[in-house]
Image (tube, rainbow, N blue to C red):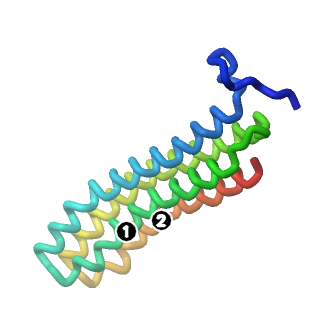
Amino acid sequence: MVAVDCSTFASITLCPTFWAATGAGLSVLLSAIGAGIGIGISGPAIAGAGVERPEVMLKTFIATILAEALAIYGLVVGLLSVFHITNSLPIEGGVRIFAAGLTMGAAALGAGFGIGASGSAMASATAEKPEIFSRAVVSLILAEALAIYALVTALLLVFAA
């Protein structure tokens, strides 16, 4: 293994610490953006459903909770990535951590859109017909599953680094 001097700007493309830190940052940043998108899209519909039918407010609030979980997934991957960054990290390990962060962040971004859209539709449908909630929540759960798949993949990549 050849040691790379990460102190110069010219060697940054070969610096495993740079790639690992960028991956950790992308995991947290993109996951937080995905969570914000999910909450921002579904939140107004949930509030509207709560005004129309206050008894469905707590049931439809699950969309906000699942969207916030996206940011938690990204934070977990980001923190585990930071704990794996050492001076002896090989370039392969740095690229694996970068891939883990990119995987988690991009999946959370997509899941945030899915949770926002399906959570908004679920809140509107549940306000209209409360008995449809159990069927309407399925699409919300499937959107969250995308982020869980990415979390498992990212954790495997980080632990292999």
Q: Is residue 51 left or right of residue 150?
A: left
Amino acid marked by disc 2 = Leu
The answer for how far apart the CA atoms under marks 2 and 1 are is 14 Å
Q: SS class of the residue under badge 2?
A: helix
Could you say where residue 131 lies in the image, as x and y percent from the top left?
Answer: 27, 84
Name the residue located 71 percent from the left edge and 56 percent from the top edge: 156
Q: How many marks overall?
A: 2
Numbered mark located on residue 65 in the image: 1
Image quadrant in which you'd find residue 98: top right
Name the residue located 60 percent from the left edge and 39 percent from the top edge: 21
Numbered mark located on residue 142 in the image: 2
Name the residue located 69 percent from the left edge and 19 percent from the top edge: 11
Q: Residues within 10 Å of mark 2 (few under 14, many from 20)?
A: some
Could you say where residue 34 lies in the image, as x and y percent from the top left?
Answer: 40, 50
Image quadrant in which you'd find residue 124: bottom left
Query: In the image, is residue 42 above or below residue 49?
Result: above
Q: Is residue 160 left or right of residue 124?
A: right
Numbered mark located on residue 17 in the image: none
